Amino acid sequence: MNTTSRIQDVSGPPPDARPAGDFVAVDDSGEFSYHRSEQDLLTAFEYVAEAACIFDRNGTAYRLALDPNRHLVLAPSLGPVEFHWLRQAWLDAQNAHPESYRLRRFFPLTTEEVVLDLFETLTVEHGPAPAEGLWSLEINSVASHPTSLEDIDRRLAHQNQLEHAHVKDPFGHVYRPVRHRSHWHLPTSAGFILYVETPGPGTVY
């Protein structure tokens, strides 16, 4: 892929501005990953072209480079990540690997929305627990507060029907759990659960 297609031709942070905080990366196979820091990001990759796109919470894009000692480093910023490419790459990853990206939010309409959705959903699915907020699970109007998405999976595994279940993530988004078959000839119970965003009832606490 051509990395330059992921960058908008508009003004952004100075080229020598150093990022701070966490990152999301898209690898050369199109899979998304969350990284808590620049060091965690660098240790996750083995060669420059392995990261097709890297961006921070401001939507600023970066690439990997080699220092004089041929160690991987984060190169200066390349400007804002290209919105249409990023949104399509995210949809493609969800369709190709539904078992890896199970929180399905409303279709993002802006760069800010898709960047925020990626950081939030990848954090609660694969990263550290958010500093604030709790998961909520409501089944037949009975609410509980599971500790993680895996905990919610375990509780829902015992439910024959999911129509009366709703889940709220630590960021306040409400989802309807839906069982997804791993293969068409297998029973629904042999698959996994997707969480599809919904306006939700006002009774989820």
Image (spheres, rainbow, N blue to C red):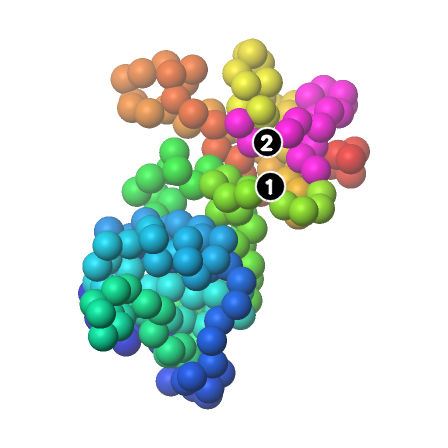
State the residue at coordinates (33%, 39%).
97
Residue at 50% over, 44% down: 127
Position of 16 relative to 61 (above/below): below
Q: Residue 205: x and y, percent?
A: 78, 35
Give whichever of 6, 123 is nearer the camera.
123
Q: Which residue is mark 2?
A: 148
Asked whether residue 20 appears in the rendered view, the answer is yes
Chain part drawn in magenta: 134-150
Under tag 1, what secondary structure?
loop
Q: Is residue 174 magenta?
A: no
Look at mark 1 in the image and give the residue it sits on. Answer: 129
Q: Are marks 1 and 2 in contact (CB under 8 Å)?
A: yes
Say whether residue 141 is magenta.
yes
In the image, taking residue 61 as reference, residue 134 lies left or right, namely: right
CA distance for labels 1 and 2: 8 Å
The quarter of the picture where residue 169 lies is top right
